[in-house]
Image (cartoon, rainbow, N blue to C red):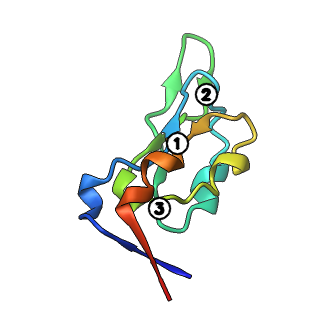
Amino acid sequence: MKKRLLAPREEIPWYPAIDAEICNGCEACAEFCRPGVFAPGPPETDAVVVKRPKMQVANPYNCLVLCTRCEPVCPSGAITLPDPREFEKFVEYVE
């Protein structure tokens, strides 16, 4: 069954959040997400080590409303999504 949005996509605040404290920069989310929601952030450096950049939500409105498939792909558990029940009002299911 297909979904049709009942409001312009830019008015629906459905997109993931990344906890930078636990993101390991593995890029699994970016490799998995076809719409291109995720991208590496700026490189992190400290006095001794250059670290992989943390991932960021670069294109939040590319996220498909009510899609939750990226959450379990993140090995560190850094990705969270809003409560889907709050967003059902924005979607109509059509054949």
**Number of the label disc, if any, that sits on residue 24:** none
Residue 47 falls left or right of residue 61: right
Is residue 59 in view from this perspective? Answer: no
Calculate the distance from the C-alpha at mark 2 to the C-alpha at mark 1. Answer: 32 Å
Instruction: Look at the picture and state if 59 lies above or below 79.
Output: below
Residue 46 falls left or right of residue 11: right
Along the polypeptide, which appears first: circle 2 or circle 3?
A: 3
Q: Which residue is mark 1?
A: 83
- Crowd around label 2: few <14 · some 14–19 · many ≥20 (10 Å): few
Instruction: Look at the picture and state if 61 lies above or below 92.
Output: above
Residue placed furthest toward the top: 47
Seen at 49% across and 41% down, the residue is 82
- Residue 95, percent from left and from top: 50, 89
Calculate the distance from the C-alpha at mark 1 to the C-alpha at mark 3. Answer: 21 Å
Along the polypeptide, which appears first: circle 1 or circle 3?
A: 3
Q: Which residue is mark 2?
A: 51
- Residue 61, percent from left and from top: 35, 56
Calculate the distance from the C-alpha at mark 2 to the C-alpha at mark 3. Answer: 23 Å
Amino acid type at image mark 3: Gly
Mark 2 element type: strand
Residue 9 falls left or right of residue 92: left
In this view, the residue in front, 90 or 69, is 90
Q: Which residue is mark 3?
A: 36
State how many labels appear. Answer: 3
